[in-house]
């Protein structure tokens, strides 16, 4: 390097002779990623030590090398950065294929808007990678939209972290341009994803009284409200998704929504579901803490509380669902099994259902095996068939405390057909059965 260039570089960037720079055989130290595009003729192979993605924050730094650009090297502003010469790029040194959101610009302090930075990180992880979130950090997406959604669509990855939070801003009163169907804090649309460590997924919605389509309050109870069908965690068209730690999903119309997926295993707390507002038509558009739709081989255990509809809602044509749940303070049901669902294995302790029952089984459902304890609710169990869509092989053992109306209601909306068949409903205390 000639003397003139050396002096110029020293005045702009300064040559750092610290131990850390020497240890990594780096000639230069960059204060932030903005220094990558400084117009200087660095020779190929130059190594630099990046102190921080954002100047002075001490996060997202690392060692980079100036290498020849190629089609295989995508500018992602986390691992590969543009240089001042289009023929070269700055490439980060990576060990063991472990990726960090801070490399892409996240601060994760719960205040800074990490939206676009984590979006970029998730877009650029590769098959077989491990994504490591900072322990006890809060990653915040202030205004989620289609341009900065947090979407995992890469299969065969591991997510690590302990007690970290993914949180977004609420949707209420956002401009319509920001809203889209199934807006979620985190969407998973991939296969073979393992999440290791405790994680909180927060939808950021606030509480209001439930309202009808004309704006009248229908309850003094307050539940969260969103301007669209918003979610905390949305697992969609995925297979083999496992959470080995505890997951907490909260503050969304549907805090946890599993759709068209298979082999999902989750344990955690699911609370504060809500209502889409403004209400359109007669449907109150109420959400459940957990919603399972057209899915199979699902295992969920944990607690559901403060739900505008039910603790867990199993949508039509779901199968092989195993639940072990405690539910509390649900406006209608602890658990509701919708039409034509099959193969439901349920262990339920349900308390304080305001208007409905601990468990409801709807038309055409079959092969339901439930052991339930229901307290402080209008009903223990409701089984409702409709015409030829008769509930079949429904087996419920129940106990109860402080039930204000009929313990069990079993009916067919068409009196010409039986209400239930090949079933056994047993009061565990009395030993009496309804068959």
Image (cartoon, grey):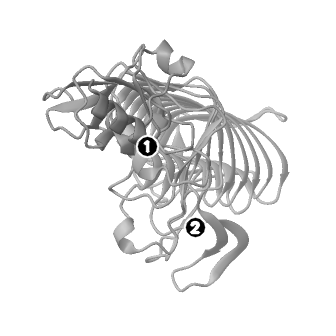
Taking the image as shown, residue 91 lies to the left or right of residue 204, namely left
Is tag 2's residue or tag 1's residue first in the polypeptide sequence? 1
- Element carrying mark 2: strand
Identify the image quadrant of the N terminus: top left
Percent of width and height locating residue 185: 49, 50
Q: How many marks?
A: 2
In this view of the protein, can residue 345 be seen by the observer?
Answer: yes
Q: Position of residue 11 (x, y in %)?
A: 41, 41
Front residue of this view, candidates 61 and 372: 61
Work out which quarter of the rendered image holds the C terminus and state it: top right
* Residue 77 visible to an observer of this rendering: no
Numbered badge on residue 118: 1
218 sits left or right of 241 in the view: right
Q: Is residue 116 left or right of residue 249?
A: left
Could you say where residue 138 lies in the image, as x and y percent from the top left? 61, 44
The numbered dot on residue 321 is none
Q: Which residue is located at x 53 percent, y 86 percent?
A: 214
* Coordinates of residue 150 in the picture (x, y in percent): 42, 46
Residue matched to label 2: 225
219 lies above or below 44: below
Q: Nearer the viewer, residue 128 or 218?
A: 128
Q: Considering the numbered disc 1 on the image, is that residue within a helix, a strand or a loop?
A: helix
Front one among 420 and 291: 291
Residue sitting at the far front: 3
Q: In which quarter of the image is residue 205?
A: bottom right
Q: How crowded is mark 1: few (under 14 residues within 10 Å), some or many (20 or more)?
A: many
Q: Distance between the residues labelled 2 and 1?
A: 26 Å
């Amino acid at each position: 390097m000639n003397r003139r260039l050396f002096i110029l570089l020293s005045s702009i960037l300064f040559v750092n002779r610290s131990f850390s720079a020497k240890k990594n055989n780096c000639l230069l130290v960059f204060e932030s990623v903005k220094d990558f595009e400084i117009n200087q003729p660095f020779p190929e192979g130059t190594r630099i030590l990046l102190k921080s993605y954002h100047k002075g924050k001490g996060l997202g730094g690392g060692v980079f090398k100036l290498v020849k650009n190629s089609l295989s090297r995508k500018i992602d502003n986390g691992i590969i950065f543009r240089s001042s010469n289009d023929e070269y790029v700055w490439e980060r040194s990576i060990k063991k294929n472990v990726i960090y959101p801070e490399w892409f610009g996240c601060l994760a302090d719960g205040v800074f808007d990490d939206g676009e930075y984590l979006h970029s990180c998730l877009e650029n992880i590769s098959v077989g990678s491990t994504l490591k979130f900072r322990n006890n950090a809060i990653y915040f997406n202030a205004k989620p939209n289609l341009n900065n959604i947090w979407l995992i669509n890469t299969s065969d990855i591991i997510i690590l972290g302990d007690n970290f939070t993914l949180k977004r801003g609420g949707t209420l009163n956002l401009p319509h341009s920001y809203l889209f169907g199934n807006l979620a804090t985190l969407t998973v649309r991939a296969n073979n994803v393992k999440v290791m460590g405790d994680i909180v997924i927060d939808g950021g919605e606030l509480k209001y009284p439930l309202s009808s389509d004309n704006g009248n309050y229908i309850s003094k109870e307050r539940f969260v409200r969103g301007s669209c069908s918003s979610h905390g965690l949305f697992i969609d068209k995925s297979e083999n998704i496992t959470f080995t730690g505890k997951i907490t999903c909260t503050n969304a119309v549907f805090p946890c929504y599993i759709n068209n997926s298979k082999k999902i295993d989750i344990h955690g707390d699911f609370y504060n579901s809500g209502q889409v507002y403004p209400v359109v038509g007669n449907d109150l558009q109420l959400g459940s803490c957990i919603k399972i739709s057209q899915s199979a081989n699902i295992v969920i255990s944990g607690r559901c509380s403060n739900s505008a509809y039910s603790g867990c809602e199993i949508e039509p044509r779901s199968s092989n669902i195993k639940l072990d749940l405690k539910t509390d303070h649900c406006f209608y049901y602890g658990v509701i099994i919708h039409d034509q669902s099959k193969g439901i294995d349920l262990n339920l302790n349900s308390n304080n259902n305001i208007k409905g029952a601990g468990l409801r089984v709807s038309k055409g459902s079959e092969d339901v095996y439930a052991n339930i304890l229901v307290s402080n609710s209008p009903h223990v169990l409701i089984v409702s068939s409709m015409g030829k869509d008769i509930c079949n092989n429904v087996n419920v053992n129940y106990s109860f405390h402080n039930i204000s109306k009929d313990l069990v209601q079993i009916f067919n909306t068409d009196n010409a057909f039986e209400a239930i068949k090949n079933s056994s409903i047993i009061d565990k205390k009395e030993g009496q059965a309804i068959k």
